[in-house]
Image: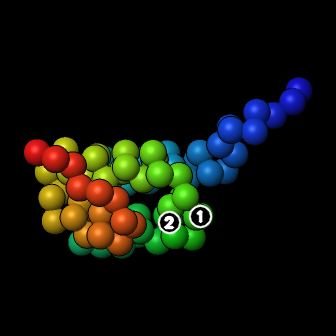
Amino acid sequence: MEMDETAIPVDKAMIITSIEYMILNLYNNPDSMFPAICQLIDEHQITGMKDTMTYFYEMLLFRGYEDHAQKFAEKYSIPPLNN
């Protein structure tokens, strides 16, 4: 079976899923979980996946974590959404 060159490797997909889960559960302790999210992104080089990074930013924003979303956008050079 030939692998699609645009496919995301399974290990990276698992990290992305973990980050999504962490964002969904951010309400438990946002001040300690947010740095952990950024650490996972940096360690696994997710920053090159612009659509995924924008998705994470939007998740933070739409779930009501405006301050964390702003920090995320600044750290990873994501243009803010127009309101």
The residue depicted at 46 percent of the width and 71 percent of the height is 39
- The residue tagged 1 is 44
Place of residue 11 in the rendered image (x, y in percent of width and height, measured from the top left): 67, 50
Amino acid type at image mark 2: Leu
Residue depicted at x 24% and y 60%: 69
Q: Identify residue type, mark 1.
A: His
Decide: few, some or many residues near mark 1? Use Cα within 10 Å; few <14, some 14-19, many ≥20.
Answer: few
Q: Is residue 81 visible?
A: yes
The answer to whether 67 is drawn above or below residue 16 in the figure is: below
56 or 30: which is nearer to us? 56
Where disc 1 sits, the SS reads loop
Dot 2: element:
helix
Horizontal and vertical percent position of residue 27: 21, 56
Quadrant in the picture for residue 73: bottom left
Label 2 belongs to which residue?
40
Name the outermost residue toward the top: 1
Single out the residue that lies furthest toward the right: 1
Query: In the rendered view, does 50 fall on the left or right side of 71?
Result: right
Going 34% across and 59% down the picture, which residue do you hit?
A: 78
Residue 42 place in picture, x, y as percent: 51, 70
* Screen quadrant of the N terminus: top right
Q: Residue at x 45, y 45 (%)?
A: 51
In the image, residue 57 sits, relative to residue 40, either above or below, namely: above
2 and 1 marks in contact (CB < 8 Å) = yes
